[in-house]
Image: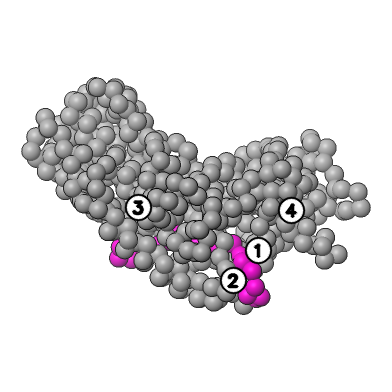
Amino acid sequence: MADTNDIQAFIQPYHIPEASDELNASLKTMAEGFAVTDGMIRKIITEFHRSMKQGLAGDDQNELPMIPTFVNRRPTGRETGSFLALDLGGTNLRVCQVTLNGDTTYELVQQKFTITLEAKASRLWDFVAECVGVFLEEHDLKPDPGRRTIPCGFTFSFPIFQTGIASGNLSMWNKGFTVPNSVGRDVVNLTQSAFQRHHVPVEVVAVVNDTVGTLMTSGYSYPDTQMGIIFGTGTNAAYWEDLKNVGKWEGDKGGEMVINLEWGAFDNATTVLPFTMHDNKLNRKSSNHGLQVYEKMISGLFLGEVVRNALLYLVDQRLLFGGRSSEILNKSYTFDTAYMSEIVADSSPDLKTVQTVLESTLDLPPTTLIDRKAVQNVCNMIGTRGVRLSAAAMAAVLLSRPELLTSSVSVGIDGSMYQFYPNFERDLYDVSRVFLGADFVDNRLKLRLAKDGSGVGAAIVAMTVDQERNAKA
């Protein structure tokens, strides 16, 4: 791409010489709406810093949440021992045994249990205890000599109000869960009570979210890790902050703590984000209308839907597919973000992969090469916007701690967008170079894949808590 400070750089690549003037005019207008110039990113970074500062000073629903996680000890990579981790998501419960080798490497043994409808509706805590009991039995795991329980970290991916490293009250259920007598109660107590009922010798010593897990997993292998990010179905980040900058923290101000940004909620008022009619349509129809606006522009759950809206807009103008659609394309969330990845990666002269996705997967009538080029262009526009907005947020957080940028910095990242979207990592580096400086990006910044971070990271946090307890004992 040419000069990314010039909006023409975001329009010119999408001109199709053999297409009609009407289609090119519509693509040009669309490209202008999705463009994220360097100037726009500078405004986003300024607004990010303002909102971070307000969120650190006190709780305000219009600002970034900036949640203290109570995690205040960095792993060194030299720790050893085996620890348990639970990772409760919307579909599966993962039970993991993580063995830290003391040389920045670890081994992972894990088992996935599909969460039953009965568990989602009523008996979740007993279901968790039963699964952990099965895992302990199958792997012959028992507490260490002299101990009654095995310490465990818990990655809990539902909204909680955290009150301590091992305590947090459930704010609400989502993802189809309706377990009664749980909202407003401490999820660690509920889990621990079930362990006691089922005679499972495990103690939850830490509860974390998946970004904290990603940060800690990367931190064990690369002790210079300052930040953990999820770029996947959803998006969020956590980073190390100096406690003297956290005005709302009422404890000891010495040292540092991991802060969970919950950055999907950035700029819900869309004062600086490039919000288009296609985003507005998605937002209007979503269950959390007006919330998580930033997340809806960059994460895997939503990007395909923005593309679908944009394509139907062209269809309605009779500029694409001869004005025809299909039953599949007419339904919400049928254009999977994985299709975007396939379409963007297609470099064949006749765009054969694009044709297969459109005609076989989405059941559209036969397409022309101009149709296929237009679809690829729309995917590229929206994908490029996504990665540039992703890089803007990462750069904003790193720039908020400029004293760290003179040394080497690792950023642990997990998620399907980072792993599978074409050139996502390369583009993160390219955009960061403009705002963080070529010297820092080329010589000191390292983006690291922290795969399975949510499980491994919970075990690492459990290890740091356990060590602290033993030191005090």
Q: How many discs appear?
A: 4
- Give the magenta part as a residue range: 251-272
Query: How far apart are the two marked residues, 3 and 4, measured between alpha carbons?
Result: 38 Å
Q: Earlier in the sequence, mark 3 or mark 4?
A: 3
| Rendering coords of residue 210 (x, y %) | 57, 51
Separation of marks 1 and 2 at Cα, in angstroms: 10 Å
The residue depicted at 23 percent of the width and 29 percent of the height is 372
Which residue in the structure is indicated by mark 2? Answer: 243
Amino acid type at image mark 2? Leu
Horizontal side of 143 relative to 440 (left or right) equals: right
**Pointer 1: what residue?**
72
Q: Is residue 108 above or below residue 302?
A: above
Answer left or right for 239 relative to 437: right
Residue that appears at 45% across and 52% down: 440
> Separation of disc 4 and disc 1 at Cα?
12 Å
Q: Main secondary structure of the magenta part?
A: loop
Residue designated by label 3:
434
Compared to residue 314, the image places residue 347 above or below, namely above
Residues marked 4 and 1 touching at CB (< 8 Å): no
Horizontally, is 271 left or right of 143 in the view? left
Q: Secondary structure at mark 2?
A: helix
Looking at marks 3 and 2 on the same chain, the residue that comes earlier in the sequence is marked by 2
Residue 72 in percent (x, y) is at: 65, 63
The tag earlier along the polypeptide, 4 or 1, is 1
Quadrant in the rendering for residue 49: bottom left
